[in-house]
Amino acid sequence: MAHALAESHEEAANDRVMFGFWVYLMTDLLMFAVLFAVYAVLQGNTLGGPTGRDLFSLPLVLAETLILLTSSFTCGIGMIAARAGNKNQVLTWFGITFTLGLMFLGLELYEFAELIHEGHTITTNAFFSSFFTLVGTHGLHIISGLLWMAITLIYVLKRGLNKHMVRKLTLLSLFWHFLDIVWIFIFTIVYLRAFV
Amino acid sequence: MKEFLLGKLSLRALPHEWFTIGATVSFLLLALIVIVAITRLKRWKWLWNEWLTSVDPKKIGIMYFLVGGFMLLRGGLDAIMIWLQQALSSGSSQGYLSADHFQQIFTAHGNIMVFFVAMALIFGLINYIVPLQIGARDLASPFLNTLGFWLFVAGVIMVNIFFMVGGEYAATGWLAVAPLSGTEFSPGVGVDYWIWSLQISGIGTTLGALNFIMTILKMRAPGMTLWKMPLFTWGSLCSMIMAVTVFPLLTATLFLMFLDRNFGAHFFTTTLGGNAMMYTNLIWMWGHPEVYILMLPSFGAFSEIVQTFSRKAIASYKSNVLGMIGVSAFALSVWLHHFFTMGAGANVNAFFGLMTMIIAIPTSVLVFTWIATMYKGRIRFATPMLWFMGFIGTFAIGGIAGVLLAVPPVDFQLHNSLFLVAHFHTMVIGGVLFGIFAGLSYWFPKIAGFRLNERIGKYAFWCWLSGFIMAFTPLYVLGIMGATRRLDHYDASTGYQPFFIMSLIGGIVIMIGVALQIVQIIASFIQKRHLLDITGDPWGGRSLEWATPSIPPPYNFTVIPTVSSRDAYLDLKSLGLLKHDYEDIHMPRSTASGIYISAFAFLAGFGFVWHINWLAVLSIIAIIVCVIMRTFNENTEYTITAAEVEKLETDRIKKLLPAPAGNNEDMGLREFVGIVIVWGLNVIRTKPWRTH
């Protein structure tokens, strides 16, 4: 009886955390909404300087996109493994996800470094301010996602796949897919639209 | 090297003007007195374990009340300074404040009153009452709640620390409109303090709101469907949903402003393609709903009060709820009425003007449900009811003024005039603050275990109401006469001065009201045993919070009640269905993580304000480490067994003493003054400060 009660207590807590995390993701999405709106307003303000069309490299961004989409896929497989309780597979698939995330981050930093090298920084004009902020904020989210993933994997390694860990992995995968969706919008609105 | 270590900080940042020195000395003195008192009473451990690290929403609620009440005095001091300057500064007299100092004062007044008084007291009420009303033992995430509170405290410190370090606050108005708030026109640290006090406390608000949404939607007692939820909980739910919707906008906007100021970005600048008008839009997209975030819980509190003191269920519960939902929904699409004059065009202005007028409809529905509830009710004119009735009148006046301002051609005449200032003070004082006072006097017995003194409470109410009318009616007139807001000086020929003086007198009457409220609380403590609430239900309440004893135990309910109607407690007591049984209870453990994270958030903000980047970066790393340690801590709960609960309950009942026989009347002012004089004489006679 007491055991069943504790069980249902646990389940209710789980349910609340999942719901709360969804609400959190929506708040994060609203922050991105502001950054997207700001980008939409300011993107034309280049003051005669180079525009996105002159600077963006579509093959690079396509590579970034494919890498991030693939990482979402491997993250999904990792979750199936987590629900099945297969620790080694979880470590493998999330390890692959982590590597892909790192590759994405590397490419993004490379893109930023190129731009900065050519003398385009956040202070240049409003277009670059909004570009670096929107894409950079997504990048910061990727960094926190990677950090979170690394630490969760270390704990999985140490503590094994208990209920808490599966819950944490579920939240992490939600976060990762969320970043993927935001990236799709960045890919469309920032990069593809520059060439329309 | 020095610049790396200290950023912009130098000895010049130390206090050197009369007001910064004065404030620093009084803060330090106050801190010294508190520290000495706690040390002498040997209460440090108790304070840390029982209060500061507590995750009990009731204790966090009380801490919100204390900080919010203290900030009310701080913001009130600003208000009196503004009033005094405006009453004096006519013609050849320049008043006693410099223009720059005056600007800092009205900026601080606005920020403190909205963020650190109204929000604090509203969050305090929600913390204390909502879990009790829905039959919950704690919140969905007790940790997020303590974290939200401590981030709020970090914001409070950030908004006041400029007295000691820096010496200047933003002189930009409470929303720091661009480009005035950019580095070009505000090179000092004032705006940076503004950014970080709002940013840190705003993130706390988002987390708190998220937590309450989870709690209200997922943790209600069995049987309590959404349509059976008490109206204060409904108001809180609407308010919290709005908060999670718009506070992220504030966070993002402040972030952009920070990038502008610290990293030379061009979002809101006048040069290199920045767009200052975008700032106005973004900040009001948050700013307008913010007013309703404050208002809706007050609406809910009024609904509870009008039912209890009319001894009648609310007239048309569903209309009331739909009214609140309507207000929240429309509130998101009216922000542009704050800047009709900015030039968005006739069609855009017309749309937002209409939306603003439409929002009066759900609001009126609420007012009519309250009036209809009083109709044929047996009304008791206790203090909460007085606050409510005062509110109905002021709210109607303020609402009509608001609808007037919603008409763009009228707004072109009255924009940024004192008419506007009078309007929003009518709403925020007459609506929000009266709601908070009504709620606090209504729920005080639940929170403290004894009633408040009714007699002095009524004096306080009448001072507030008459002072309020005297203070703000002249401002409506002044606005129509053409006086703009934020005037630090005006020409004698304008004829403004008599009105400003009348307004000042009104302000002084309000301050007397505040003083009487403090007297009321002290007098109630003195008379505590007479005012004791033994039943837990002093007013004949209808909702579940009255089913708990006053003061409720940490676990609120020994057994979670099953709800079958809207007036859950009224039914349980009339049908005699209250269960007295005991069961094992899971409770969250206290945690200091919230304090640590908020302390580092404060340091990070401080680092950014002064461009001490190493401090900011290290603090952010420390925050991340704290969060990781907290999330991977699996030992966050403990269990109270049924036997322990039974013992706690019987102990509690044993301790309840019946009120002493004799004169049970609430003491009046004369009696209070007598007691204070006798006590003072006694202190002088015994000389407790002399150590033997």
Image: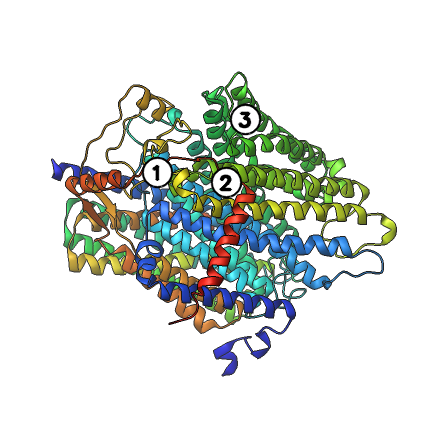
**Mark toward the viewer: 3 or 2:** 2
Q: Residue B366 carries which label?
A: 3
Given the image, on which type of amino acid does mark 1 rest? Ser
Q: Give whichever of B55, B473 is nearer the camera.
A: B473
In the picture of the structure, the residue carrying the numbered disc 2 is: B667
Residue at 16 percent across and 57 percent down: it is: A159
Above or below, A123 against B144 in this view is below
Amino acid carrying label 3: it is Leu
Question: Mark 1 belongs to which subunit?
Answer: B
- Figure quadrant of the C terminus of chain B: bottom left
Q: How crowded is mark 3: few (under 14 residues within 10 Å), some or many (20 or more)?
A: many
Residue at figure coordinates x 72%, y 49% from the top left: B485
* Labels 1, 2: one chain: yes
Q: Residue at x 19, y 53 (%)?
A: A90
Can you tell which of label 1 and label 2 is closer to the viewer? 2
- Give the Cα separation between the discs numbered 3 and 2: 36 Å
The part of the image, by quadrant, that contains residue B183 is bottom right
Q: Which chain contains the residue that carries disc 3?
A: B
Q: Which disc, if any, is residue B550?
A: 1
State left or right for residue B29 relative to residue B573.
right
Tell me residue A5's x, y (percent). 16, 37
Q: Residue B586's quadrant in the figure? A: top left
Q: Provide residue B551's location: percent of width, then percent of height.
A: 34, 41
